[in-house]
């Protein structure tokens, strides 16, 4: 048993004997990184971080474009024993200011083009170190790291020590940092390695962003822990992915990626002949997509379910002996994960009945950063975590997600919290109040739509409101459409009836 529970150690121990084999290949074959490169580069960046002599538990906040070096930075933060805090590249000033103010990182790494405004925010929040990293190996981080030794002993960490903080809105309110420990992440990675039957020779197409659970943990840890090569896409491109399928065996995507793959005539059984496994998650996979993909590729997508606070919770089986993959379900609770469905009084319901999904296990996070009261609210007295998802478990143990009790929209795999967008809209001139809803969208699954009510005498218009929001918040959160209404539908208690609005606008994006 290794006495150092640092996740990096487990990942590095899995490197193949031949360190000169390719670990990561750029999708266009313009660059190749060996396992030795990963080891040396992460050592150098970790040595740079160590040279800053930061207190234990210091956060390193990172908002950079996807690149292999950005992945190395993540691994180096683990290696140095610090806490990684990834930020979506779409976030703008107000969002970054909130995250940096809340997390108080000791180090911020950003794109060189954003150094001006991000460093101002960071220095104001007390951050001393701001480095830059672009997607072509430029920036001060690598310049400084190049002067460091390429040998480094990974910092000794206990399983319980923090490895990462992922910001998420939980079931209510402002974004909260989910604190994940080395043991949380490693236990989930080991469970998935076994359940998804990672095997020698597997090659992963990595086409997801690396600032959320799916791309950063599920995909990267999976490949690293199996010493599998990754074919690295800095951005998803359906045609380019299909062109590389013959060189790969595993693909992971949010449902939008499958919709986009299906839109390409080049997606054929022949193109997929070398593939072993297609995995979908982060948002509901429509049964139409599941069926169409099987028909076209000959592969049955494996759908799984998880969240930032817990990593992966359920999965359809990979091996036939574990059962069949059932479309419309998210499969079984993963080995070691406890899952129960409870009614509003918190009593477990019978199989087949619908209720709130609660979970327990070594993968479940340690709580929300500096918010003990919020953490307490989202756990039951017997310490099950309330996911905010609504579902059922059938007699065979298959879990189906039927909805969410949290007011959350998932658009193209990204979470959008209506309350946050409503807050921005309500501050706009001429707007008295607003309601933000998700409606079906053929590409993104759900699209964000807003309904606003004018202040007396004002005449707010949709396009200027959309433009104003684009200047303030991440582009994927901006409503695709805004409607001005005389009033919002309310129930007898005065609560806005979003279901009425959703019904009204349900067919908005129908072809
Ligand atoms: C981009 N746009 C979106 C969007 N992504 N709009 C709504 N929802 C989205 N997800 C908009 C932009 O605002 C922009 O609009 C236009 O599309 C083009 O932007 P782009 O950046 O060029 O888009 P594209 O590259 O096509 O991105 C689409 C995508 C991306 C599907 C590839 O969204 C993506 O990578 N999604 C994956 C998200 C993910 O990894 N989630 C995992 C979370 S982990 P305009 O108007 O400005 O032109 C998790 C837990 C779990 O949930 O279980 O895994
Ligand atoms: P996040 O907060 O970004 O980690 O998003 C987690 C949420 O994504 C979960 O609580 C679910 O609502 C949703 N989710 C993830 N995977 C699936 C899936 N396969 N089907 C339906 N919803 C999913």
Image (tube, grey):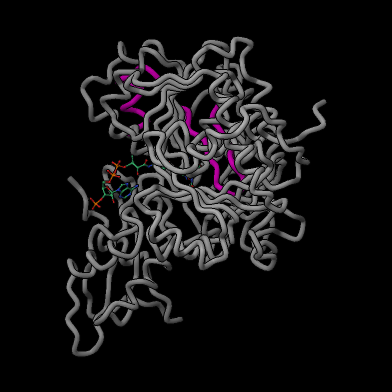
The image quarter in which residue 46 lies: top right
The image position of residue 44, as x and y in percent, is 59, 33
Residue 19 pos. (x, y %): 58, 14
Q: How many marks?
A: 0
Q: Residue 450 appears at what percent x and percent y?
A: 29, 66
Q: Is residue 95 visible?
A: yes
The answer to whether residue 355 is left or right of residue 433 is right
Outermost residue to the bottom = 457
Q: Is residue 240 above or below residue 276?
A: below
Vertical arrangement, residue 173 with respect to residue 486, above or below: above
Give whichever of 117, 473 is nearer the camera: 117
Residue extending farthest to the front is: 147
On screen, residue 23 versus residue 94, left or right, reads right
Q: Residue at position x 46%, y 37% from top?
A: 281
Q: Taking 406 as reference, is 349 left or right?
A: right
* Residue 339 visible somewhere in the drawing: no
Residue 205 image offset from top left, x and y in percent: 42, 24
Of residue 65 and residue 275, the one placed in the foreground of this image is 65
Q: Report the quarter where the N terminus lies.
A: top right
Judging depth in this view, the residue of 243 and 384 nearest the camera is 243
Quadrant (top left, top right, bottom left, bottom right) of the C terminus: top left
Can you say whether 137 is above or below 50 in the image?
A: above
**Quarter residue 449 falls in:** bottom left
Residue located 68% across and 34% down the image: 7
Residue 324 in magenta stretch: no
Q: Which residues are magenta?
A: 289-317
The question of residue 293 being in magenta is answered with yes
């Amino acid at each position: 048993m290794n006495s150092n529970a640092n996740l990096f150690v487990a990942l590095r121990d899995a490197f193949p004997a031949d360190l000169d084999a390719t670990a990561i290949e750029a999708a266009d074959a313009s660059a190749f990184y060996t396992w030795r490169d990963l080891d040396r580069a992460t050592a150098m960046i970790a040595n740079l971080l160590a040279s800053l002599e930061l207190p234990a538990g210091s956060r390193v906040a990172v908002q950079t474009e996807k690149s292999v070096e950005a992945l190395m930075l993540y691994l180096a933060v683990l290696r140095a024993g610090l806490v990684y805090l990834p930020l979506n590249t779409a976030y703008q000033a107000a969002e970054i200011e909130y995250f940096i103010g809340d997390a108080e990182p000791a180090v911020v790494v950003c794109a060189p083009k954003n150094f001006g405004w991000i460093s101002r925010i960071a220095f104001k929040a007390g951050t001393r170190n701001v480095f830059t990293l672009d997607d072509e190996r430029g920036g001060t981080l690598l310049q400084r790291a190049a002067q460091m030794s390429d040998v480094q002993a990974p910092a000794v960490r206990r399983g319980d020590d923090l490895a990462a903080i992922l910001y998420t809105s939980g079931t209510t309110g402002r974004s909260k940092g989910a604190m994940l420990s080395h043991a949380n992440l490693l236990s989930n990675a080991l469970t998935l390695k076994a359940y998804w039957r990672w095997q020698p020779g597997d090659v992963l197409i990595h086409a997801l962003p690396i600032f959320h659970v799916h791309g950063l943990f599920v995909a990267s840890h999976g490949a690293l822990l199996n010493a599998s090569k990754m074919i690295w896409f800095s951005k998803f491109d359906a045609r380019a992915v299909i062109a590389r399928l013959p060189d790969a065996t595993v693909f992971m995507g949010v449902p939008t990626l499958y919709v986009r793959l299906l839109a390409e005539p080049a997606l054929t059984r022949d193109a997929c002949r070398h593939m072993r496994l297609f995995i979908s998650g982060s948002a509901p996979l429509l049964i139409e997509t599941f069926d169409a993909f099987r028909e076209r590729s000959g592969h049955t997508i494996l759908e799984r379910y998880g969240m930032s606070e817990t990593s992966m919770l359920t999965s359809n089986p990979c091996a036939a002996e574990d059962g069949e993959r059932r479309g419309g379900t998210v499969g079984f609770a993963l080995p070691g994960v406890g899952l129960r469905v409870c009614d509003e009084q918190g009593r477990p319901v019978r199989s087949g009945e619908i209720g709130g999904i609660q979970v327990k296990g070594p993968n479940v996070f340690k709580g929300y950063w500096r918010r003990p009261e919020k953490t307490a609210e989202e756990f039951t007295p017997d310490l099950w975590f309330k996911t905010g998802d609504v579902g059922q478990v059938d007699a065979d143990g298959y879990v189906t997600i039927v909805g969410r009790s949290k007011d959350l929209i998932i658009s193209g795999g990204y979470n959008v919290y209506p309350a946050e967008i409503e807050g921005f809209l309500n501050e706009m001139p001429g707007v008295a109040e607003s309601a933000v809803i998700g409606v079906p969208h053929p590409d993104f699954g759900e699209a964000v739509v807003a309904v606003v009510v004018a202040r007396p005498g004002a005449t707010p218009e949709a396009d200027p409101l959309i433009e104003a929001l684009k200047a303030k918040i991440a582009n994927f959160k901006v409503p695709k459409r805004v409607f001005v209404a005389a009033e919002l539908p309310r129930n007898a208690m005065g609560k806005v009836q979003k279901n009425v609005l959703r019904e009204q606008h349900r067919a908005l994006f129908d072809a």
